[in-house]
Amino acid sequence: MNSFFPTTIGATVLALLASMGASAVQADQKLLPAQSEITFVSKQMGVPVDGRFKKFDAQIAFDPSKPQSGKIAFTIDIASVTLGSPEPDAELPKTPWFNTAKFPQATFQSSSIKGLGGGKFEVSGKLAIKGNTQDAVIPVTLVQAGPSTTASGVFTIKRLSYKIGENEWADTAMVSDDVQVKFKLVLTGVAKF
Amino acid sequence: MITAPASRRYHGFAIAMHWILAIALVTIFILGHYMADLPFSPHRLKLYSWHKWAGVTILILSAVRLAWRLTHRPPALPQAVTLAMSGWQTQAYHATHIVMYALFFIVPLIGWSYSSAAGFPIVLFGVLPLPDFVAADKALADLIKPLHGLTANALGALVLLHVGAALKHHFIDKDGLLDRMRPGRS
């Protein structure tokens, strides 16, 4: 009995420490989804079509003065996508598009973060949509106002590399391959820089 | 300044515009009705784009045609025809043409507005972005939506009346009235 307690406590503490180290990202910073947005633009026969994802979350452990040791991950609820028009919105969950039933989430996991000075950062990582993973380099600009920090940026993805819009929809003259993704994420808990 | 007509026929330019736009309008009318019934697909999106490009082109050509019409008096109706036409027929003749001209502009302008209100700006031939003169607004789009088809159908009805009247003059009255708009040299 005498040796039981220290061993049990020790084991419990070790287990706790191990689980903390093993989790992908400690969410030291918090995303405020209500004030954030992830939108995109694609061109349909030259006409810009705007879309957005209404539901998403981020797990961020980031210190602006030590960007290289930071970690950023986010998940997007694919079912929350909308082009603002009922007919195309009815198409998007189908197999040639997002195949939402099989791939309900898109994810991003950072592998490295580079500080470029002046609140600008370059986040490299893997973007996975519809079961297809591609390397992505995402430029991020941080602007701080009071307790919140806004992380914003624009980057382009090639929809065909994720098989978004297959078969009859693969024609890039109809829907451009380039899709410009814009994000504005409002965070709390980011250290001042 | 209005130039006096030198012959009993319309000027070659007016005749060309009449037939070019007649073919364009019949084609775009059929295209519009056909495409609206299609299920959502890349094919339908393509037809919608072509329909919008054709509509804007017709709008521009109609403006050119109207400018010509306002500055060039058409040939006077043959005396035999004016003598045979009663008061209401003369009024119907003028009214039909005036309302058709008005619809040449109203129909494409409503279509353009509907596209803008629905959030789809028109990019002419896929390369030239055209201005939206209404903002994207779902409530406005819902309001405008039936008007494009309604006014197009009204123009279609007037076209039928116009063609019917022309054929009446040719086959029933046999008054040679159509000679003034017949394609070809005078």
Image (cartoon, coloured by chain):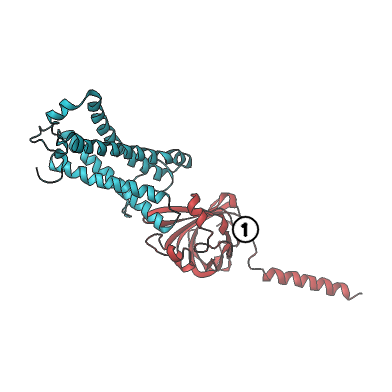
Chain colours: A red, B cyan
Position above or below: A6 against B3: below
Q: Residue at x 31, y 46 (%)?
A: B55
In the image, B30 versus A168, the foreground residue is B30
- Residue neighbourhood size for the residue with mark 1, other residues' Cα within 10 Å, grouped as few (<14), some (14–19), many (≥20): some
Q: Residue at x 39, y 51 (%)?
A: B35
Considering the image in quadrants, where does the N terminus of chain A appear? bottom right
In the image, B152 versus B169, the foreground residue is B169
Considering the image in quadrants, where does the C terminus of chain A appear? bottom right
Q: Position of residue B151 (x, y in %)?
A: 36, 38
- Relative placement, left or right, of B31 versus B71 is right
In the image, B24 versus A88, the foreground residue is B24
Residue designated by label 1: A29
Q: Can residue B161 be seen by looking at this rendering?
A: yes
In the image, B165 versus A127, the foreground residue is B165
Report the residue that reaches farthest toward the top. Answer: B87
Report the residue that reaches farthest toward the left. Answer: B6
Quarter assignment of residue B169: top left
Write down the chain letter for disc 1.
Answer: A
- Relative placement, left or right, of A4 versus B107 is right
- Relative placement, left or right, of B56 versus A110 is left
Q: Residue at x 30, y 36 (%)?
A: B158
Q: Residue at x 34, y 37 (%)?
A: B154
Amino acid at dot 1: Gln
Q: Position of residue B161 (x, y in %)?
A: 28, 36
